[in-house]
Amino acid sequence: MYKVALFDLDGTLINSEHKNREAWARLFRRHGVPYDDSVLRSFTGRPAKEAMADHVASFAGHSVDELCAEVAAYAALPDMPAAVTVDGAMELLHQLQQMRVPLGVVTSGPRDYAESALTTLGALQLLDVLITADDVSRGKPDPEGYSTACSALNVEPSQAIVFEDAPAGILAAKRAGIFCVGLTTTHDAEALAEADVLLKDLTEVRWPHIGPS
């Protein structure tokens, strides 16, 4: 049986990918840089600065920091799509807390964003550990974030389970040696093929019988 449950944030507990993609799309349109859906997907589940570094050469005269600040400004505009809770998220968090299962979130977002989103969700006070982009030197798909969470909770990776919606996050979990449940909330099943188990969303979780016994 798994001793701790670790969750990604965007696309796993809250569905903000439509908002995030629109913010990135506005950046590309504003600077006249061509993009398609595959470009927007490349930002999912990765630290913004690391993802932006892959594209900054197309934005002549602008730095990664400047472009990420511009995207953050777009994301804060009142006309942007609102983030919503992923189906089953709060129900599962409350169930696990009542069962005394330690809970953690490992996100590619900065701490101020994560704490604000989790507070709005009503989940921040349920967590035993929160690992953000500010707490690691290497973002997903590097395993550092999930390895750090396991160390903070004093468990071996084999004693943890991860819930993720993005290919980069699934790779991070697997590279950390953790069983990973992929959620098809933002990507199709083919994109999440590295996950150990695939579920539609968190309503399909039947704790603790997930994966091998």
Image (spheres, rainbow, N blue to C red):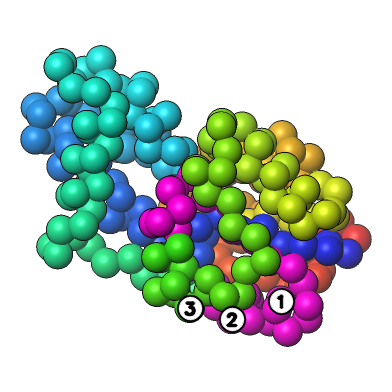
Looking at the rendered structure, the number of numbered marks drawn on it comes to 3
**Could you say whether the residue bearing mark 3 is in a helix, strand or loop?**
loop
Q: Which residues are magenta?
A: 88-114
User: Could you give the CA–CA distance between mark 3 and mark 1, rounded to whole angstroms?
Assistant: 15 Å
Residue 147 or 210: which is nearer the viewer? 147
Whether label 2 touches label 1, CB < 8 Å: no
Q: Earlier in the sequence, mark 3 or mark 1?
A: 1
- Residue 151 lies left or right of residue 109; in this view the side is right
- Residue 94 lies left or right of residue 2; in this view the side is left
On screen, residue 59 above or below 159: above
Residue topped by disc 3: 122
Amino acid type, mark 3: Gly
The question of residue 70 being in magenta is answered with no
Which residue is painted at 71% across and 76% down in the image? 96
Residue topped by disc 1: 96
Amino acid type, mark 1: Leu
> Is the residue marked by circle 3 packed among few (<14), some (14-19), or many (20+) residues within 10 Å?
few
**Could you say whether the residue bearing mark 1 is in a helix, strand or loop?**
helix
Query: Does residue 70 appear anywhere in the picture?
Result: yes
